[in-house]
Amino acid sequence: MIGGQAVPLTAIFQPSNHDPAAMIFWKIRLPRVLLAWLAGAGLAAAGMAFQALFRNPLATPFTLGVSSGASLGAALAVRLGWSASGLGVSGTSLGAMGGAFLAIAIVYGLARLKHDCTAGSMLLAGVAVNFFFSSLILLLQYTADFYDTFRILRWLMGGLQMVGFDAPLRVLPWVALGCVLLASLAGELNLLSVSEDLAASRGVAVNRAKTLVFLAVSCMVGVIVAICGPIGFVGLMCPHICRLLLGPDHRYLLPATLLFGGAFLVICDTAARTVFAPTELPVGIFTSFLGGPFFLWLLLKPGKLGEASA
């Protein structure tokens, strides 16, 4: 059903430039669902990996400053009027991607200054970068005119508004490569989620494993944020719920988190488009609506916080 009217299946699955129903399905609905699933799966897998790496159920894909770096790049592109595009990617997305990779490089460089690259040093470096970039974003918003301020604010809300398959195809290889690497490191994540000493005693190259997880997850998240904007709480809620249902074994937790995270964001995006129709909410606002009660549930539920991840 499109536009409140029943549409024959043949009209949908036989695309035609003269058929509005087929064009809406193939150029808007299907690409948007695919992008939502890929973004949700990638963010959920990233949250799962960081929660294991830092042994903290409240870690998110944005803990190490990737989101703030991408947001700074996008805000700078808007503020300076970078309208040019490259390889079919808008200037704002290119700026966001550059900012995300800059944040990754800074966090990794700061963590390596102590020559051991511990989870604690990475976390502190990420928090410092996050706060610094956030202050620069506020400065850009304050000095921008009304129109640019609105564009920056709208981008920071996150969204999946797009036409065609270009965006899903750009996200797909990064999510696929990141998830393949996480799957190959499932055993290491199981040990790291208990303690680094235990992992080292079982023959795990701890620094190498942490570096691979950090770089793979951060690059995957950076591309997702550059395309979709920062969509919060997906990487917090989905892996935590899957861990409560299936336990902490990452051999089973990773595929479950991918499926649940993708489905979760597709459902959230559908609800954001339809609940207040004809007004469409940015999906980042809708996930934040769910994130607040989820934090309260974590706080009030019986047992110690993070008990399921031990």
Image (tube, grey):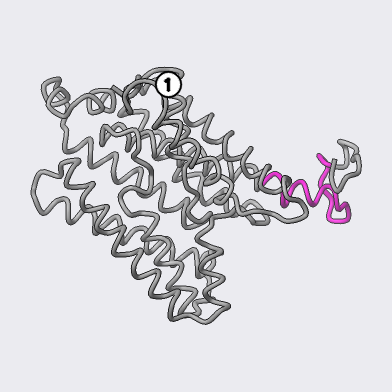
Label 1 SS: helix
Compared with 6, 94 (above or below) is: below
Residue at image coords 17%, 25%: 199
Q: Position of residue 306 (x, y in %)?
A: 32, 27
Q: Residues within 10 Å of mark 1 (few under 14, many from 20)?
A: some
Q: Main secondary structure of the magenta part?
A: helix
What residue is shown with label 1?
A: 244
30 and 111: which one is in front?
111
Closer-to-camera residue (36/235): 235
x, y percentage for residue 56?
29, 34
Q: Nearer the viewer, residue 101 or 68?
A: 68
- State the residue lying farthest toward the front: 300
Query: What residue span does the magenta drawing correspond to?
Result: 12-31
Q: Is residue 277 left or right of residue 167?
A: right
Q: Residue at x 28, y 22 (%)?
A: 310
Query: Could you say which is closer to the camera, residue 114 or residue 299?
Result: 299
